[in-house]
Image: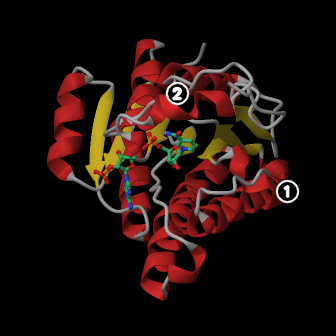
Amino acid sequence: MKKQTIIVTGASSGIGKEIARYFLEKGDNVVINSTTADKLEAVYQELGAGDNLAMVAGNVSDKATGENLAQTALDKFGSVDVLINNAGIFETRPFLEVDEAYLDRFLNTNLKGTYFTTQAAIPQMLKQHDGVVINIGTPLVNHALGGVPITAQMASKGAIHALTIQLAGEFGKDNIRVNTIAPGTIRTPMHGDDADQSAGLHLLNRVGEVEDVAQMVYAVAKNNFISGAIINVDGGMAAGHNLN
Ligand SMILES: NC(=O)c1ccc[n+]([C@@H]2O[C@H](COP(=O)([O-])OP(=O)(O)OC[C@H]3O[C@@H](n4cnc5c(N)ncnc54)[C@H](OP(=O)(O)O)[C@@H]3O)[C@@H](O)[C@H]2O)c1
């Protein structure tokens, strides 16, 4: 398979780190990003600090970070083939207690981060007449959970699902594919030690592992005929729940 250049945002932890590892193991070039430079540097070392790996620290809600990521991919590896918009935050707060600053944090990181990083990557993909954007969403945008107050999170992620479909429409003729992978509850630092409490949300009665998501991201990146799709990797959660 042709060696490609993959940009992964939010790659210093959890799902993003595993996605970076997965593509590196398969032989691709990877550019990793996260906000915290020392955390990113530690993961750069953990992933081997090899010739096929580069890093760019920065906040994805700042368009300059996306531009820096695309330029680094181009300068170091010669192309921008796959952008994985994985950087994201998750917290709970009751709807009536959400203020503008709190809502803005979600819109800035989750929505604007995805929007502007994609805006920075697409010009090079247009030159190549080839490219893939994979966003990380959630099946919960279409599947509410009473007792889990996440309106700010869902408003930002729902916008990512909508953006995915419209971008796929606008750039399909240019051979740029845009998809969203929507994971169920995945065991990552985002959930601390609490992830297994969500096992029963999934028909498989377990939470997912980061490898479950990385495998699907890789498959979608390499398949040339998937676009405009929202693909659940959710242990059956969108279909139903397991009552323990
Ligand atoms: N885990 C789940 O159950 C689950 C389920 C569905 C969807 N997701 C989505 O999957 C993605 C990854 O989640 P995760 O569980 O792997 O989370 P995680 O372990 O908390 O990792 C989040 C990553 O995003 C980075 N990040 C956060 N804000 C950023 C920003 N503004 N700019 C650049 N990097 C930023 C963090 O690094 P710094 O701290 O250095 O910024 C970290 O590397 C998120 O979009 C999340 O919403 C997760």
Few, some or many residues within 10 Å of mark 2 (<14, 14–19, 20+): some
Mark 1 vs ligand 1: CB below 8 Å = no
Residue visible at 50% across and 81% down? Answer: 97
Quarter occupied by the N terminus: top right
The quadrant holding residue 115 is: bottom right
Q: Which residue is mark 2?
A: 4
- Furthest toward the front, the residue is 244
Residue visible at 36% across and 34% down? Answer: 193
Mark with earlier residue (2, 1): 2
**In the rendered view, would you say 193 is above or below 149?**
above
| Of the pair 86 and 26, the residue shown nearer to us | 86
Q: Is residue 221 visible?
A: no
**In the rendered view, would you say 27 is above or below 108?**
above
124 left or right of 87 in image: right
Q: Which residue is mark 1?
A: 169
Q: Cβ–Cβ below 8 Å for labels 2 and 1?
A: no
User: In the rendering, which numbered label is found on residue 34?
Assistant: none
Mark 2 vs ligand 1: CB below 8 Å = no
Measured from the top left, where is residue 38 in percent x and y?
Answer: 14, 46
Few, some or many residues within 10 Å of mark 1 (<14, 14–19, 20+): some
| Of the pair 155 and 19, the residue shown nearer to us | 155
Tell me the amino acid under the disc marked 1.
Gly
Residue visible at 82% across and 49% down? Answer: 172
**In the rendered view, would you say 159 is above or below 238?**
below
**In the rendered view, would you say 3 is above or below 234?**
above
Measured from the top left, where is residue 21 in percent x and y?
Answer: 39, 22
188 left or right of 96 in image: left
69 left or right of 136 in image: left
Tell me the amino acid under the disc marked 2.
Gln
Mark 1 lies on a secondary structure that is helix
| Of the pair 42 and 242, the residue shown nearer to us | 242
Residue visible at 63% across and 36% down? Answer: 184
